[in-house]
Image (cartoon, helix red, strand yellow):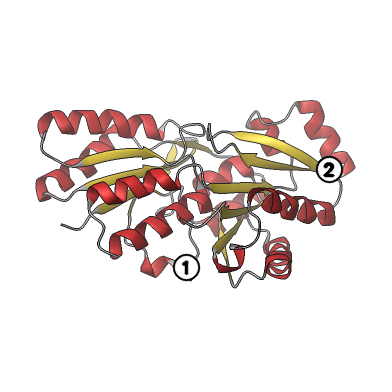
């Protein structure tokens, strides 16, 4: 029986490859005051970055236990083996909600094949994870084979990113207030990454120019992949209303590694709330598996 892949809307994947991805995505929530939006459904990336640039502020909320429970219950009643792949527990409590719902469902449906995987990924990294896993399912992998492959992928997805407005990193607790103020005044741009073991955000280095930012990201890619198979990989660049910088990054990757499949996409609203406008994020695999 075909395996169902279930994720959430923190997953970003270029529309150039998305039509081939058969994944159900549960929405997180974007909140402003008393108004709650279903991520990517009630509010789009274009709208939220426009409003943020106009000075509006938003918060977010994870996929709820109830949301997961209802999705898992439907799959259980249909008898469809399901693997739930959600954003890193180091970034959100969504994973914990998914596990709680899974435990309840398996008490009610003990023969149902269901597993929750902490992908240690988010946005385009989660998109890549699902891209390769979906190919495995389409090739005929059963539940256990798909789950084993998901565990192979864990820790092999790399996320590296940078932004222009350090205030958002300060609000998210990634930089001190002093670093944020000095960074904005001096034009210093932090290069951050997601730790592949813990799934949380860390500072790699700080660049003093756009050129240094791009070269710093290229250096990170070299350190985490020899480049021998990057030319054959799908590399995702997501951005929050920074198309020019994303285009420059795309050209740099193509020139450095000869990569043929470098795709661009906008970061989903629920993640953009925390990064702010002007960020670019690059996602690739350490090696093909």
Question: Viewed as shown, does residue 258 lie left or right of 97?
Answer: right
Q: Position of residue 242 (x, y in %)?
A: 68, 59
Q: What's the distance in space between the residues labelled 2 and 1, CA to CA?
A: 32 Å
Tell me the residue that label 1 is attached to: 15
Q: How many marks?
A: 2
Would you identify the image quadrant in which residue 36 lies? top left
Q: Which residue lies most toward the right here? A: 186
Tell me the residue that label 2 is attached to: 188
Observer-nearest of 126 and 222:
222
Q: Position of residue 91 (x, y in %)?
A: 51, 34
Residue 251 makes an appearance in the image: yes
Dot 1 falls on a residue whose secondary structure is loop
Quarter of the image with the C terminus is bottom left
User: Neighbour class for label 1 at 10 Å: few (<14), some, many (≥20)?
Assistant: few
Upstream in the sequence, badge 2 or badge 1?
1
Q: Position of residue 152 (x, y in %)?
A: 42, 46
Identified at 42% across, 58% down, the residue is 132
Observer-nearest of 167 and 71:
71
Would you identify the image quadrant in which residue 96 lies? top left
Quarter of the image with the N terminus is bottom left
Identified at 54% across, 54% down, the residue is 287
Q: Position of residue 176 (x, y in %)?
A: 75, 26
Dot 2 falls on a residue whose secondary structure is loop
Question: Viewed as shown, does residue 263 lie left or right of 148?
Answer: right
Observer-nearest of 64 and 125:
125
User: Neighbour class for label 2 at 10 Å: few (<14), some, many (≥20)?
Assistant: many
Observer-nearest of 256 and 33:
256
Q: Are marks 2 and 1 in contact (CB under 8 Å)?
A: no
């Amino acid at each position: 029986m075909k395996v169902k892949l279930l994720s959430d809307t923190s997953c970003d994947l270029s529309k150039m490859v998305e039509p081939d991805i058969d994944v159900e995505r549960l929405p997180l929530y974007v909140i402003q005051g008393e108004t709650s939006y279903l991520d990517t459904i009630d509010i789009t990336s274009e709208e939220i970055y426009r409003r943020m640039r106009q000075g509006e502020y938003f918060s977010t909320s994870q996929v709820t236990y109830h949301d997961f429970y209802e999705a898992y219950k439907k799959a259980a009643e249909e008898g469809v083996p399901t693997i739930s792949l959600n954003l890193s527990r180091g970034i959100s409590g969504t994973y914990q909600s998914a596990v709680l719902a899974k435990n309840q469902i398996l008490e009610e449906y003990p023969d149902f094949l269901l597993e929750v995987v902490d992908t240690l990924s988010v946005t385009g990294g989660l998109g890549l994870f699902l891209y390769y896993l979906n190919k495995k399912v389409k090739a005929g992998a059963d539940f256990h084979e798909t789950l084993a492959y998901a565990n192979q992928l864990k820790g092999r997805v790399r996320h590296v990113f940078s932004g222009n407005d350090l205030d958002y990193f300060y609000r998210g607790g990634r930089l001190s207030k002093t670093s944020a103020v000095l960074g904005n005044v001096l034009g210093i741009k932090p290069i951050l990454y997601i730790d592949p073991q813990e799934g949380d955000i860390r500072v790699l280095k700080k660049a003093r120019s756009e050129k240094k930012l791009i070269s710093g990201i290229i250096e990170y890619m070299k350190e985490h992949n020899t480049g021998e198979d990057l030319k054959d990989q799908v590399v995702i660049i997501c951005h929050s209303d920074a198309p020019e910088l994303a285009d420059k990054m795309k050209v740099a990757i193509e020139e450095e590694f000869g990569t043929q499949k470098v795709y661009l996409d906008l970061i989903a609203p629920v993640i953009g709330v925390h990064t702010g406008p002007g960020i670019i994020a690059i996602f690739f695999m350490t090696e093909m598996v």
